[in-house]
Image (cartoon, rainbow, N blue to C red):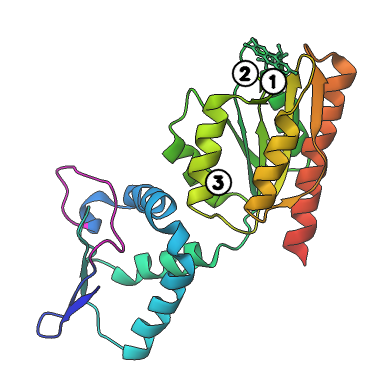
Amino acid sequence: MFTYMPEEKILFSSDAFGQHYAGDKFFDDEIGDEIMFHARKYYANILLHFSPRVQALLADVAKMNLDIRMICPDHGIIWRKDPSKIITAYDQWSRQEPAKKAVVIFDSMWGSTTKMARAVTSGIESENIGVRLMNTRKWHRSDIMTAVMDAGAVAVGSPTLNNGIFPVIADVMTYIKGLRPQNKLAAAFGSYGWSGEAVKILNKEFEEMKWEIVDDGVKMLYVPDASDLERCFDLGASLAKKLKEKLAE
Ligand SMILES: Cc1cc2nc3c(=O)[nH]c(=O)nc-3n(C[C@H](O)[C@H](O)[C@H](O)COP(=O)(O)O)c2cc1C
């Protein structure tokens, strides 16, 4: 729910346009562009799943033709220098259009899936697509989620553990799924010892999120050798090529 105060031209926007920022700065012009990182992270982790409603709301606000001098959200800094900047950013984020970026999310017990993740990343880079390699034990799920929102392609790697995916990967996938990121190309990979269910389970997760699976995925028995890693490189390259094709459409 928004409240508009015509006398002062202030929009009190509740949760919208906020950030999880608590510092000694109160206004956008005091902190500068650095605040956009916090605003993006907030959107990715709090509002992304409401994106269709955000689009509808922005259209309604535009129709009202309000003269907005300042936006005061419940959380974070006040937008007084250029309130239209954050409105434009919300319009962009809520469209969920694919971006020319990729993220590789992975974890590993003994390092085999790490080797695969690095090779997938190199494959993506070989096609000149910017990529972030994120280990779920080094990055908080909210940072991973922000990277996913920004990316057009997502690769996820997990070893098989007790016929399932690695619990830390399950944690992150559950979190990502709840925020309903759309328009992603996806691919899975992982090392296994005997049954190797992880890739299949990850593909199912992608399907549930309606992400486009570009390849059946790559599973490797125990430690990958050079030719196995080449296959992982190719997986990354084909994910990146597919993203470029999609962006050219
Ligand atoms: C506790 C435990 C349970 C495992 N369960 C399975 C399993 O159910 N199926 C399977 O294929 N491999 C299983 N593995 C084997 C691992 O998937 C295999 O060692 C893999 O190479 C680990 O990859 P990483 O080096 O990326 O951790 C298990 C390993 C451990 C330690």
Query: Height in image: 37 above or below 225?
Result: below
Which comes sooner in the sequence, label 3 or label 1?
Answer: 1
Q: Is residue 57 visible?
A: yes
Per the image, the residue denoted by label 2 is: 108
SS at circle 1: helix
Residue 61 found in image quarter? bottom left
Which comes sooner in the sequence, label 1 or label 2?
Answer: 2
Q: Main secondary structure of the magenta part?
A: loop
Q: CA distance from mark 1 to mark 2?
A: 5 Å
Q: Closer to the camera, 179 or 21?
A: 179
User: Quick one: label 1, few (<14), some, or many (20+) residues within 10 Å?
Assistant: many
Q: Is mark 1 within 8 Å of ligand 1?
A: yes
SS at circle 3: helix
Q: Is mark 2 within 8 Å of ligand 1?
A: yes
Q: Amino acid at mark 2?
A: Ser
Q: Amino acid at mark 3?
A: Val
Q: CA distance from mark 3 to mark 2?
A: 20 Å
User: Quick one: label 3, few (<14), some, or many (20+) residues within 10 Å?
Assistant: many
Per the image, the residue denoted by label 1 is: 113
Query: Height in image: 209 above or below 6?
Result: above
Q: 119 left or right of 114?
A: right
Q: Closer to the camera, 54 or 192?
A: 192
Asked if marks 3 and 1 touch (Cβ < 8 Å), the reply is no
Asked if marks 1 and 2 touch (Cβ < 8 Å), the reply is yes
The stretch drawn in magenta includes residue 154: no
Per the image, the residue denoted by label 3 is: 148
SS at circle 2: loop
Q: Which residues are magenta?
A: 14-27
Furthest residue toward right: 227
Residue 143 on image: x %, y %: 45, 38
Residue 54 on image: x %, y %: 42, 70
Q: Name which residue lies at 16% across and 53% down.
A: 26
